[in-house]
Image (cartoon, rainbow, N blue to C red):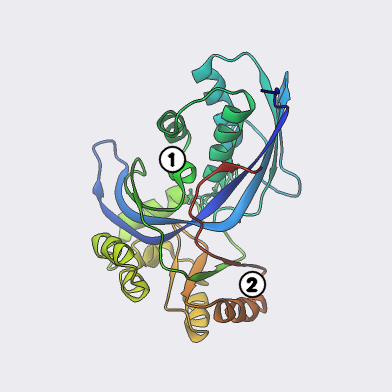
Amino acid sequence: MARLNCVTVLAPAKLNLALDVVGLLPSGYHDLDMTMQAITLYERVVLRRSPYLNLRLPGSLVAPNNKNTAIKAALAFFDYTGLLAGVDITIYKNTPVRAGMAGGSADAAAVLVGMNELYGARLSMSELCALGAKIGADVPFALMGGTCRVQGVGDFLKALPPVPECWFTVVMPDYGVSTPEAFAAYDRVGSSVHPDCGAQEAAIRAGDLDALCAAAGNALEECSGAKDTGAIKTLLREHGAVTALMTGSGAAVFGVFRDEGAARAAAQAAKRRWKQVYVAQPDRGGARVSR
Ligand code: ATP
């Protein structure tokens, strides 16, 4: 087989169809129960062979330093495989930052998948997930993609059947939310919202969009104090969203729509007030090489 010099990977962003905090683990981390959904909004990551380790993020304010998830992923890959090489990484970011959409995790997943291909390392999905889990809690899901019930700190993943056809309109306010701060706020004030992830899993298995939406909710939403959440939810509902909620630790808020027209009309209306607005559908995969 010809030696590969360049690989492009697409890595979907995610939405939380449900997020519940069910307790505290002995490690001090929160024990979560979530439904995660990959969506058709992609980070595009180009990897080239190089003797050096380089990272560029054209047009993004995210710093290309050693704290970047992409660099952490490349170093973890070299450490695990023992490969003596470098890699040149370019990330075209399409996912808003500090949105609760796991863009940073998608970048790490993309680097792991891309380097596996570029260097023919043949690491299995479970090896990639184990490497990814050390970089960030959402990286294993970013590798698996599709629809998953995710528990623990993000390390217990169960693949679910695809959700019924639907559309998402996602609105990112002009501010982001820090995930550690969101959990600290939860510890202070708690939540009256505890979605039933078991009922949502049953709804997904039954292909029932109404029941899926009835079971949707986010235990971090009330305490996040994100000032635009209520206004975005109202706008999405007024435009026909079956349900609307915050994703992850915020700040992005999304609506679930039965049809594309309503989702796009909601997006048009949202664009009058917010700059970052996206229309997407469920994606059935995770980070993958683009052929
Ligand atoms: P999550 O749902 O996983 O909490 P998020 O959408 O809230 O994700 P990200 O945008 O993935 O958060 O990352 C948030 C922070 O992580 C940023 O403030 C940034 O400094 C840091 N970071 C490190 N690497 C990356 C990356 N490749 N892309 C985006 N942010 C990154």
Which of pointers 1 and 2 lies earlier in the amino acid sequence? 1
- Report crowding for label 1: few under 14, some 14 to 19, many 20 or more residues within 10 A (C-alpha): many
In what element is the residue under mark 1?
A: helix
Q: Residue at x 46, y 34 (%)?
A: 132
Residue contact at pointers 1 and 2, CB within 8 angstroms: no
Q: Give coordinates of residue 200: x percent, y percent.
A: 30, 64
Q: Residue furthest right?
A: 58
Q: Which residue is mark 2?
A: 274
Q: Which residue is mark 1?
A: 140
Which mark is in front, 1 or 2? 1
| Disc sitting over residue 263 in the figure | none
In what element is the residue under mark 2?
A: loop
Q: In terms of image quadrants, where is residue 288? A: top right
- Above or below for 71 versus 81: below
Q: In terms of image quadrants, where is residue 278? A: bottom right
Q: Residue at x 55, y 38 (%)?
A: 108
